[in-house]
């Protein structure tokens, strides 16, 4: 370092020029800004921190067709169909809500109790769209969310089998 006439220093290795006063001012600026920034209220549009478990398929237990039929018909569960408009119009689980239609006001369509049964499904075993509804409910604090893995394909197959007997 080389000392300049005004008491500042030039560090050739770092190619920086600073004075002791400037160094103190910078340090004080950071110390003063920290608490002010920490006290800043979050914006209304800021998302709540997501629970990483909510994004995992294995976080949601499976529900079978017979159980789903019973809870859907008796309205003991809130059921979300996460399929296309066309698929939903063609067939859906009894009393299911079409996720695409309720997505904007999703919270209003959730049960009051956080431990109430919620079921999400989509096309079938290889479809993962159901996770959108399940994850959104989970991130809102709901704790009893199940996945109907057979999806609408399984539902239709079970309905056809019953009709044929």
Image: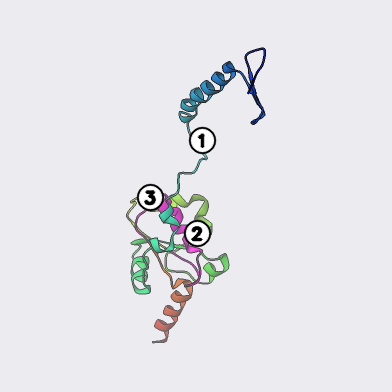
Q: Measuring from the top left, give residue 69's x and y in whole percent.
A: 37, 71
Is residue 128 part of the magenta span, yes or no?
yes
Q: How is the image coloured?
A: rainbow
Label 1 vs 3, first from the N-terminus? 1
- Tell me, for residue 99, which label it has, or none: 2
Q: Secondary structure at mark 1?
A: loop
Q: Residue at x 36, y 61 (%)?
A: 77
Q: Measuring from the top left, give residue 104's x and y in whole percent.
A: 52, 51
In this rendering, the label closer to the viewer, 2 or 1 = 1
- Tell me, for residue 141, which label it has, or none: 3
> Marks 2 and 1, how far apart in space?
27 Å
- Which quadrant of the figure contains the N terminus? top right
Q: Secondary structure at mark 2?
A: helix
Q: Residue at x 44, y 64 (%)?
A: 96
**Image position of 145 with respect to 43: above or below:** below
Q: Tell me where the magenta segment starts and ends, as one range.
A: 120-145
Is residue 54 part of the magenta span, yes or no?
no
**Image position of 47 with respect to 130: above or below:** above
- Tell me, for residue 125, which label it has, or none: none
Q: Secondary structure at mark 3?
A: loop
- Give the residue number, with chain letter if any, for mark 1: 43
- For label 2, count other residues whose C-alpha is less than 10 Å away and answer few (under 14), some (14-19) or many (20+): many
Label 2 vs 1, first from the N-terminus? 1
- For label 3, count other residues whose C-alpha is less than 10 Å away and answer few (under 14), some (14-19) or many (20+): some
- Which quadrant of the figure contains the C terminus? bottom left
Q: Residue at x 50, y 59 (%)?
A: 99
**Image position of 91 with respect to 38: above or below:** below
């Amino acid at each position: 370092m080389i000392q300049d006439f005004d008491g500042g220093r030039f560090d050739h290795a770092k190619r920086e020029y600073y004075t002791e006063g400037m160094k103190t001012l910078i340090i004080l600026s950071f110390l003063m800004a920290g608490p002010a920034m920490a006290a800043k209220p979050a914006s209304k549009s800021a998302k709540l921190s997501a629970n990483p478990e909510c994004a995992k398929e294995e976080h949601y237990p499976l529900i079978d067709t017979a159980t789903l039929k019973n809870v859907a018909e008796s309205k003991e569960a809130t059921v979300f169909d996460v399929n296309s408009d066309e698929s939903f119009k063609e067939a859906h689980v009894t009393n299911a809500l079409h996720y695409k239609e309720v997505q904007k006001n999703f919270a209003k369509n959730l049960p009051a109790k956080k431990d109430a049964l919620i079921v999400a499904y989509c096309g079938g075993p290889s479809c993962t769209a159901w996770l959108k509804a399940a994850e959104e409910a989970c991130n809102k604090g709901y704790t009893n969310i199940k996945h109907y893995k057979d999806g609408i394909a399984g539902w239709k197959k079970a309905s056809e089998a019953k009709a044929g007997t």
